[in-house]
Amino acid sequence: MYKEINKERSKPIEKINGCGKCSLIKKCLPSFITTEQLSLAEGLISQKIKVPRGDEIKPIDQGSQFLKIVQTGFLKSVISNKDGRDQVLDFLMPSDAVHLSKDLDHRYSFHIIALEDSVICTVPFDKIADVAILDHDLSSHFYEVLNIEINRRNFSMFSLGSMKSEEKVAYFLLDLGTRFHQNGFSQLNLNFKMSRYDIASYLGLKHETVIRTLSKFIHEGLIELNHRELKILNLLGLQQLINNIH
Amino acid sequence: MYKEINKERSKPIEKINGCGKCSLIKKCLPSFITTEQLSLAEGLISQKIKVPRGDEIKPIDQGSQFLKIVQTGFLKSVISNKDGRDQVLDFLMPSDAVHLSKDLDHRYSFHIIALEDSVICTVPFDKIADVAILDHDLSSHFYEVLNIEINRRNFSMFSLGSMKSEEKVAYFLLDLGTRFHQNGFSQLNLNFKMSRYDIASYLGLKHETVIRTLSKFIHEGLIELNHRELKILNLLGLQQLINNIH
DNA sequence: CGGATGCTTGAGGTCTATCAAAGCGAGTGG
DNA sequence: CCACTCGCTTTGATAGACCTCAAGCATCCG
C-alpha cells in the first residue's frame, strides 16, 4: 500500500487567469492558433491549483468535469487495489493532461501525487464547449489532448507487455529524455524526481531489477549515474538495445 | 510481425443515419438523455463503416478527426514496431470507442483488425461541437467516452505491470465476462473471438503460458473449455485468485 | 484432402523475483 | 551541530515463474 501522504496540508488556489497569459500556451493550445483564437482562449477561465511535494490531487471537482493540465512540476499517477498492490501508470510533466478517474471499481483507487511542488491548471469542460461554439479547431485540440494521453498509454502497454527488463529500462530513459527535451531541458542529463521503486512499478519490474540493469548500463559505458542524476553517454547504444534485439 | 491481413477487400459504406435511430443509443449516448437532446442527436450525422472479418480499419479519415464507436462485431487493436514485435492493446466490443492514433513514431504502426464482421460508427468532431453549442451535457459525454478509454488502459496497465500469469488470465476472463454482460450476453459463457496468441499478447504472456493456466483452471474446476467456448463454473474462485493472493 | 494455422503438453533453461544484509543520505530532534 | 532514524539504494545468493524449444494433434479453409 502506498505510504501515507500528507493529506493535511493546504492547497492554496491562485487567482483566476485567462489561458492567453499562460506561458504554456504553445504546448497547451494548438500551434496554429491565431490572434482571434487567442482572445477566445483568454476567455477560457482556468483555475490554478498548487500541489506541494508529497501531496495528492483530490478529485474535489470531479462532478463538474474539469480538464486538468500540468503547468509546472512533476507528478506520478498511481492505481492501487485493496490488497495493497499498486502500479505507477505515468509520470506527469508540464503540458501533460492529468486524468482523474471518475467511476472506478470500488476495489481500486486512483491517485495523483506530486513528486515535487507542482501547479495544475484546470479548465471546465463547459468553458471548452463555449469556446467550441466559436471555433472548431480549438475544440478538437482539446480532444487531441486526450488522444495524446491514450497514445502514451498505448506505448506504455507495448513496453509492459512485450519488453524484457533491459529494453524496458532503456525505453524509460529514452522516453524520459525526450519528454524532458520537449520541456526545454537536456535530453541526456536526466534528473530523476522519482525513486527506483517508482520506476520499477512503472515498468512492471522489481526495484532490484531496475538497479541491476542500471548498474549493467554503467559498466557497459552507456550511462553515468550518481544519486538521481543520470547522464546518457551512448544514446545510440540505448536505442539499439530496444530495436535490435530479435 | 502480424500475419498478412486482407487489405484488398472493399469496405462498403452504408447510407448516412442519425444517431437517434441507432440501437446503441443507450450505451453510446448518456443515460440521462432527454427527448430534446435525442432530437439533437438525430442531427449528429454518423457514417457507418462495414469491416469484414480479417480486415483492418484504415485511418482514411484521420485528418478531419472522427470519433469512432463500435456498433456491432468484435475487433482487436494492435501496436507493432519495425523489428516485428507486436502487442495487442485491447479488444473492442459494441459501444467501445475506436482510437486510431494519429502521429505515431515512424518505428511503430498501429492497427485495428476485425476478429469478426463488424460495423463502426463514425462521428466527426465538428458535428459534436455543433451539438455542444446547444447542449453541454451531451458534449461532456463525448469527452467521457475518451475518459473511459483511458480508464480501460489504466486497468490493463495495472494487470500487465503487477499481476502474475494466473491472476492475469483470471482477470481477463472476468473482464471479458463483464463486458459481454454489458452487451446483453452471458457473463459466464464466453465465446472467444480471439486466438490464444491474441490473449497472450494482450496479457504480456506467451501463448503456452495462457494455455497452461487455462488447463490448470480446468483441473481446479474453475472453468470448462472446449475450442473457443469457455464456461465459468466458479466465479468467486476466479475473483479470489486476483484479490486474495498475498 | 492437404497444407496451414491454431492448440496442447513436455522438458529444460533463463530471466526476474525473492530474501537478506549492508551502505548511504536526507531529515529530525536533542 | 551531531547523532539518530528511516527510507532509499545497492549488491549477493537462491528460488521459482515464465519462456523457449520441440513434437504431436486438432481444426479450418481452399
Image (cartoon, coloured by chain):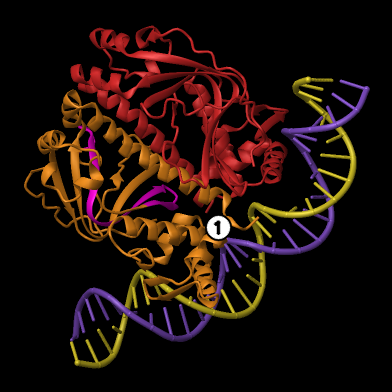
Chain colours: A orange, B red, C purple, D yellow
Magenta-drawn stretch contains A114: no
Above or below, A234 against B143 in this view is below
* Quadrant of residue D5 within the rendered picture: bottom left
Amino acid type, label 1: Ile
Q: Secondary structure at mark 1?
A: helix
Q: Is residue B1 left or right of residue A51?
A: right
- Could you say where residue A181 lies in the image, as x and y percent from the top left? 33, 59
Q: Nearer the viewer, residue A243 or A10?
A: A243
Q: Is residue A136 visible?
A: yes
Q: Is residue D1 left or right of residue D25?
A: left
Q: Nearer the viewer, residue A227 or B62?
A: B62
Q: Nearer the viewer, residue A20 or B88?
A: A20
* Quadrant of residue A107 within the rendered picture: top left
Q: Is residue B62 left or right of residue A15?
A: right
Q: Which residues are magenta?
A: A61-90
- Could you say where residue B77 lies in the image, as x and y percent from the top left? 53, 34
User: Residue at the location (58% across, 38% down)?
Assistant: B237
Magenta-drawn stretch contains A81: yes
Above or below, A165 against B104 in this view is below
Say which quadrant the N terminus of chain B sits in.
top right
Characterize the magenta stretch by its predominant secondary structure.
strand
Above or below, C5 against B135 in this view is below
Chain letter behind tag 1:
A
- Could you say where residue B53 lies in the image, as x and y percent from the top left? 62, 21
Q: Which residue is mark 1?
A: A242
User: Residue at the location (48% across, 58% down)?
Assistant: A171
Above or below, B31 against A9 in this view is above
